[in-house]
Image (tube, helix red, strand yellow):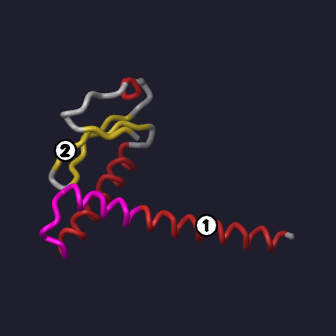
Amino acid sequence: MYVGDSSFAVSREAFSLNKNRLSVEIYGQMYNIVGNASPGYMREVAQQVDQNMRNIAQGNSRLDTTKLAVLSAVNITDAYIKLKQEYEEILHLIEDDQV
């Protein structure tokens, strides 16, 4: 997925005919998202990022948008890594049961 705002030039990849293009709002800022995923999925991703940033901002009113975005990325990456580890553990359990 390619994400840009009005100040960035759109990459050549964004002009491919099979890409979905969507404007989304994340923490009060509009972004143009381009990707192979469905518009619904892309909207859900944007909503999750927005919600994560807003949750962090509630407890940290002094943080600027950049810091909120970085902390959001850290939280989302942490959740991703934990889910990936759980998935791998489940796969190992399934493999062990099949032996």
Q: Which residue is mark 2?
A: 30
Q: Left or right of 9: which side holds 97? A: right
When the figure is inspected, residue 81 is found, relative to residue 16, above or below; the finding is below
- The answer to whether residue 8 is magenta is no
Q: Quadrant of the N terminus?
A: top left
Q: Which residues lie in the magenta part? A: 59-76
Q: Are marks 1 and 2 in contact (CB under 8 Å)?
A: no
Please name the amino acid that badge 2 sits on. Met
Q: Which residue is mark 1?
A: 87
Residue 45, above or below 53:
above
Q: Residue furthest right?
A: 99
Q: Main secondary structure of the magenta part?
A: helix
Q: Residue at (18%, 72%) from the top-left corner?
A: 60
Q: Amino acid at mark 1?
A: Tyr
Q: Return the disc, 1 or 2, that comes first in the chain's sequence.
A: 2
Crowding at mark 1 (Cα within 10 Å: few <14, some 14-19, many 20+): few
Q: Quadrant of residue 75?
A: bottom left
How many angstroms separate mark 1 from mark 2 (CA)?
34 Å
Tell me which corner region of the image, top left, top right, bottom left or bottom right, holds residue 31. Answer: top left
> Looking at this view, is 37 or 63 the one in front?
63
Q: Secondary structure at mark 2?
A: strand
Q: Toward the viewer: 16 or 57?
A: 57
Element class at badge 1: helix
- Residue at image coords 59%, 71%: 86
Horizontal and vertical percent position of residue 63:
17, 65
* Label 2 crowd (10 A; few <14 / some 14-19 / many >=20): few
Q: Quadrant of the C terminus?
A: bottom right
